[in-house]
Image (cartoon, grey):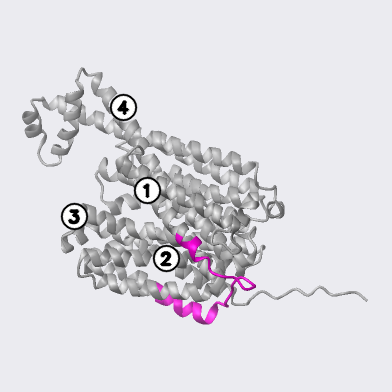
Amino acid sequence: MRSKIIELEPDPRRWLVLAAAITAVLSTVMDGAVISLIAPEVAANLNADATTIGLISSINVLMIAAFVLGGGALGDVYGRKRFLSYGLIGLSITSTLAFLTPNALWLIVVRALAGIMVAVINPLALAIITVTFDDRERPRALGLYGAALGIAGVLSLIVISFLNQRFGWRTTFGPGGLLAVTALLMIIPLVPESKASGDKQVDWAGILLAAAGLFGLIYGINKAATQGFASSVVLAPVGVGLVLLVVLVLYSSKKKDPALQLVLFQKRVFSVGVLLFAVLGFASMGTYSRLSVYLQALQGISPLRAALTLLPYSLSVFVFAILVGGWVGKIGNRLLITGGLVMMGLGLAAMGFVLNPGAGFWAYLLPLVFIGGGYSICNTPRISVVLGSAPPELAGSASATNNASFKLGVALGIATLGALFQGFANKTYFADLAAMGLSTTQITQAAQMLREWLKANAGNVAAELGMTIRQLVIEISHYQHAFTVGVSQVLWVAAAVVTVGAVLAWFTFGDNTEAGRRE
């Protein structure tokens, strides 16, 4: 008598579950874009100085990075739907409290709490997608997820800028809160509960160790962008963070159900896949921030226009994320992940070559398409392999580890590439002006002169510094050249890092989806 193989029917509501999970993550994207766009208005309205505004801007990201492992672990133990719902409720409350902000201290606390909510929402939404879809449909679902995030970044900028200009900065917290409520109303009836099997306990000590270690590490790295890596302000928190993370690893190796699941790293595809996400964060966000600053500072355009100039990057992330979901399974993981990284590296290198103060949208179009398209072509199969390699009971922890690696990569990218930019630009600037016969003192004065240029016309500045108009124009030209060289060389460094990632991917992932999962 032949035995029949019974195949379970997939959940008919699975695509609605995907929509609910995407909506949940979109609420965090909208929330995260707020402060950077409304900082001047907040400073003026709340009488906050630059240091306070910096803290308001950074505390949210720091809390996300610190508590993301804890968010994934809590969902695995107590239920992913339950804690995702808690996170959405919390985010809607913090959005309301931010709207009612009476002073800067209030906003700092509220943004810190919002960061903890996002640290719960992001990994659990992705974990729910992972356990809802099988290996065949998961790449398509993740492609739609990546496409939604790609376009959300641009839409959030437009929506928040419009609200800020038309109705005031307080209203900009509304869209994130409304999306959180919408996601909650979708998740309650649609998403089935899932969690780890067995009697697992929450590793509170591990969560706190991870939070303190990641907070210190990323806080210090963020400071390196302005203070330099050799500063005690950087070395102290980074050192403490690294020590705590080493303690966390030693502690987790002996713990039965640790917050940091070291067992996940026993699979090579998981370890390398997580590392590659840090590479993607390093290269994409590190260079995007440099390009945005370049467009605003050197080409003199507004933040909104700078974002629109860089729009091809976001649109290509969106389009290729949809396309690549259908390619997974037909084209091998090795070729997709490696090819995506190579394409991204070529885009970064090309952007470095075409960058100049007179260039605009059309000059940057193709390199930005390559950068964004390469990102999606690599990331969709990468995340499918990484999360597919983890057992379902550890979906939350796997997703949280994946997210933490990206946050670390972003922090390293912004800080490292920012520091390299300063070094490259200064070297070029001093070399150009020294060739004119200027002394070090005169070159230093030139930097101050450029700041004065923003406040006076060329004749007044030149007369005040005892320079001719021609000398002034030449020095400004050298400043533009140095700035451009600095950003270009940073782009080439990012391209080199991505190329190393491509080589690593080629020797890690299998020739096809099934082979990649077996490794």
Numbered marks: total: 4
Residue name at image x 30 percent, y 41 percent? 227
Earlier sequence position, callout 4 versus callout 2: 2
Earlier sequence position, callout 1 versus callout 3: 3
Marks 4 and 1: which is nearer the front? 1
In the image, which residues are magenta? 180-208
What's under tag 2, amino acid-wise? Answer: Val
Q: Which mark is residue 49?
A: 3
The residue tagged with tag 2: helix, strand or loop?
helix
Residue name at image x 45 percent, y 70 percent? 24
What's under tag 3, amino acid-wise? Answer: Asp
Residue carrying label 2:
118
Residue carrying label 4:
428
Place of residue 384 in the rendered image (x, y in percent of width and height, measured from the top left): 60, 58
What's under tag 4, amino acid-wise? Answer: Thr
Q: How far apart are marks 4 and 1 (CA)?
A: 32 Å
Place of residue 493 in the rendered image (x, y in percent of width and height, measured from the top left): 44, 36
Q: How far apart are marks 3 and 4 (CA)?
A: 33 Å
Q: Distance between the residues labelled 2 and 1?
A: 23 Å
Earlier sequence position, callout 3 versus callout 4: 3
